């Protein structure tokens, strides 16, 4: 007589007993002490932590975004002292900008508006971008502050301030915001949204391309479906956030203004706002593409129909992906500067190649960890796609680097160039790791899988098959005595809930057994590790790329420095002293002119002229003229009429030098009625 073991009873709390049976919710307990958060969950957690760390370090520590446009000059210039009040103030920029009411404000010493308050006038001529505002009449002497704010053609806000004086410098009570436009908390959140938008685009386009071009059977895999859908959701949410934050990002810097309807309408009238709206519309078309890819395409069985559908999805999806990429190209760096007509399509190709490579890399990582049925042929197809993407990236990247940097000095001496060097180093590191992945790919084989494991690993089969079918197909080794029904117990004796629990546990045990077999494959394990390393580097690479898109290109920065070199020339260390020989050609026509300009900077100066004859003694002449010219700014000649103080000595007070720069000093000496000569010398006046 044999004794039968009593049927296990669930505890009163409904929690699983020590036998390892699942809870009523169907969640299996840990098997043989294995942690349920290992494998794919650990990989995802690692990448998420790295994503947060990199974005926090790079975005939180980044300065407010410099823009493609830069202020290259103004009239009056920074620090200038003018004798009379000008009728208007003009500002010159290196690239096209967008301005509105209050973009240029002129404030008097008491912080009151000194301009008329109307929208700046567009005074641009050809390639010169210039805007100006009219000043109120009858302005008193003192120091005036010019504060300006605009939006560069590549979507980034720019701002600045400078001062000039009428008559003589004075104290001023103007208090300007200490925080630059585009900075603060709003700027940080906007920068994070830009990063997330790029990440969503890469997952959406790269994941869909991986399924369609490398692994068509992946269209039925839930992990691949979730990856692409989450990419779409991420890009859509980030685009909406950027659209709402656009007004405070380029204006007040307050989160509350994100819901200002007037501000939102103003954003929609700008090129960046139109690009964001276009991206949302294209994402609607992308949603239809996703529905077809994971719906009709995944269920299609006929080879001819599936091939035709693949062609249609490839063409339609390529158009939508290119359109989404164009929303960046048409509103950021590629849309301004030299060769914009070539740069924009090149930028689209660059973004698509990035998505195909990095997005496919993440898709392969998910497939290797979450879908063990991916075959070696799919991995090799992606290897070929990645190689082609790298070639496109190299060609387009070289062109973009030349266009945005322009010189070796800008490569090493500007923030954009330094970030570009970091990006190239990361790409080189990524390619080095990818070389190891290609080696593992070449050694990859498709190990035969048991029928029971196949059934358990396919979510669609496991979910559709009845409990008795799953139980009958499961390997005997995967069903323990704890999980089996009582001897002599029929299907009618087992409650439906109990049968469902047994089926789920048997499927989980079968999947665990298959995973152990898969993990024992050294080639596949090595490939997973190398792909995970590639994905980690790609997270950092994406952060550096996002910073590059919001940093002023090196070429523009150097051009702006060169254009404003005269205005930023250092002040002279003291009075300017000149000595110029002359020869009028007549009798006693040879001598030397000595000139002192004190204090030798912009504003009022004292000018003294001494003339010495060929014998070194003071020499009187019938006529002496002096003129000052700043040829770089087309100012002058400004005549100076000095008065005779003594023999061979002339002087002029309150000589106004409006701005600093390289001034040419012309001296005309007449020694007789017919003998006259003009001599000149260039000197830096700070």
Image (cartoon, rainbow, N blue to C red):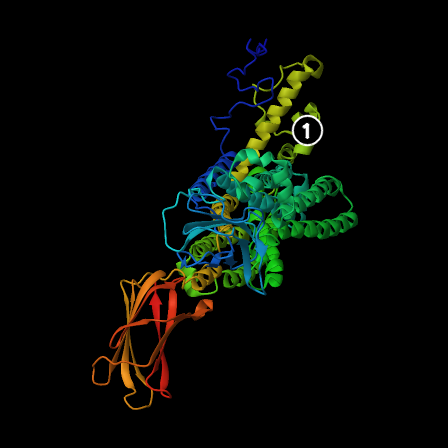
Residue 223 locus on image (x, y percent): 61, 37
Q: Is residue 292 left or right of residue 380?
A: right
Q: Quadrant of the N terminus?
A: top right
Image point 66% across, 16% down: which residue? Answer: 497
Q: Is residue 418 left or right of residue 378?
A: left
* For residue 668, above or below residue 530: below
Q: Which residue is mark 1?
A: 463
* For residue 506, above or below residue 263: above
Image point 44% across, 58% down: which residue? Answer: 84
Residue 636 locus on image (x, y percent): 44, 69
Residue nearer the viewer, 339 or 682: 682
Q: Is residue 653 left or right of residue 522?
A: left
Residue 479 picture quarter: top right
Residue nearer the viewer, 312 or 262: 262
Q: How many marks?
A: 1
Mark 1 is surrounded, within 10 Å at the Cα level, by few (under 14), some (14 to 19) or many (20 or more) other residues, namely some
SS of the residue under disc 1: helix
Residue nearer the viewer, 570 or 306: 570
Residue 595 picture quarter: bottom left
Q: Quadrant of the C terminus?
A: bottom left
Res. 215 in view: no
* For residue 535, above or below residue 599: above
Res. 473 in view: yes
Residue 645 locus on image (x, y percent): 26, 71
């Amino acid at each position: 007589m044999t004794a039968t073991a009593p049927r296990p009873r669930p505890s009163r709390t409904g929690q699983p007993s020590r036998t390892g049976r699942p809870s009523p919710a169907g969640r299996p307990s840990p098997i043989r002490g294995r942690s349920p958060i290992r494998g794919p969950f650990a990989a995802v957690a690692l990448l998420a932590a790295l994503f947060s760390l990199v974005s926090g370090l790079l975005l939180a520590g980044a300065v407010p975004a410099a823009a493609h446009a830069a202020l290259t000059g103004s009239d009056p210039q920074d620090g200038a002292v003018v004798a009379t009040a000008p009728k208007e103030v003009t500002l010159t920029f290196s690239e096209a900008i967008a301005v509105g009411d209050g973009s240029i404000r002129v404030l008097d010493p008491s912080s009151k508006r000194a301009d008329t308050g109307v929208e700046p006038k567009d005074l641009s001529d050809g390639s010169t971008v210039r805007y100006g505002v009219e000043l109120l009449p009858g302005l008193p002497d003192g120091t005036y502050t010019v504060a300006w704010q605009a939006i560069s053609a590549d979507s980034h806000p720019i701002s600045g301030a400078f001062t000039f004086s009428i008559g003589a410098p004075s104290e001023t009570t103007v208090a300007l915001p200490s925080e630059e436009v585009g900075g603060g908390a709003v700027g940080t959140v906007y920068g994070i949204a830009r990063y997330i938008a790029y990440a969503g685009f890469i997952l959406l386009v790269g994941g869909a391309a991986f399924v369609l071009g490398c692994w068509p059977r992946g269209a039925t895999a839930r992990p691949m479906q979730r990856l692409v859908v989450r990419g779409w959701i991420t890009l859509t949410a980030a685009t909406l956030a950027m659209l709402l934050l656009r007004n405070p990002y380029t204006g007040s810097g307050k989160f509350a203004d994100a819901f200002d309807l007037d501000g939102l309408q103003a954003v929609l009238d700008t090129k960046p706002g139109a690009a964001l709206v276009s991206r949302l519309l294209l994402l609607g078309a992308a949603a239809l593409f996703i529905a077809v890819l994971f719906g009709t395409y995944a269920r299609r069985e006929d080879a001819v129909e599936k091939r035709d559908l693949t062609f249609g999805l490839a063409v339609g999806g390529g158009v939508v992906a290119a359109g989404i990429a164009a929303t960046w190209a048409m509103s950021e760096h590629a849309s301004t500067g030299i060769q914009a007509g070539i740069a924009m399509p090149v930028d689209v190709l660059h973004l698509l190649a990035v998505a195909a490579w990095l997005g496919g890399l993440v898709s392969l990582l998910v497939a290797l960890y979450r879908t063990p049925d991916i075959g070696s042929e799919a991995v090799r197809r992606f290897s070929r796609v990645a190689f082609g993407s790298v070639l496109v990236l190299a060609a387009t990247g070289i062109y973009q680097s030349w266009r945005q940097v322009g010189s070796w000095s800008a490569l090493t001496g500007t923030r954009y160039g330094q970030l570009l060097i970091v990006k190239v180093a990361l790409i080189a590191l990524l390619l080095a790791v990818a070389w190891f992945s290609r080696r593992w790919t070449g050694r990859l084989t498709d190990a035969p899988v048991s029928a029971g494991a196949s059934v358990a690993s396919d979510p669609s089969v496991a979910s559709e098959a009845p409990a008795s079918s799953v139980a009958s197909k499961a390997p005997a080794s995967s069903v323990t005595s704890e999980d089996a029904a009582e001897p002599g117990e029929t299907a009618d004796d087992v409650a439906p809930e109990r049968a469902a629990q047994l089926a789920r546990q048997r499927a989980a045990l079968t999947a665990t057994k298959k995973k152990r077999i898969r993990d024992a494959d050294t080639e596949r394990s090595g490939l997973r590790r190398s792909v995970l390393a590639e994905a980690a580097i790609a997270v950092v690479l994406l952060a550096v790329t996002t910073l590059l898109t919001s940093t002023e290109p090196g070429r523009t920065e150097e051009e702006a420095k060169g254009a404003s070199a005269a205005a930023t020339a250092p002040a002279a260390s003291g009075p300017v002293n000149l000595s110029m020989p002359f020869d009028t050609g007549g009798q006693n026509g040879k001598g030397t002119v000595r000139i002192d300009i004190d204090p030798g900077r912009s504003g009022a100066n004292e000018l003294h002229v001494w003339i010495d004859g060929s014998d070194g003694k003071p020499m009187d002449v019938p006529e002496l003229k002096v003129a000052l010219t700043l040829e770089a700014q087309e100012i002058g000649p400004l005549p100076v009429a000095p008065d005779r103080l003594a023999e061979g000595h002339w002087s002029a007070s309150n000589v106004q030098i409006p701005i600093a720069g390289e001034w040419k000093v012309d001296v005309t000496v007449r020694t007789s009625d017919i003998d006259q000569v003009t001599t000149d010398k260039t000197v830096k006046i700070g």
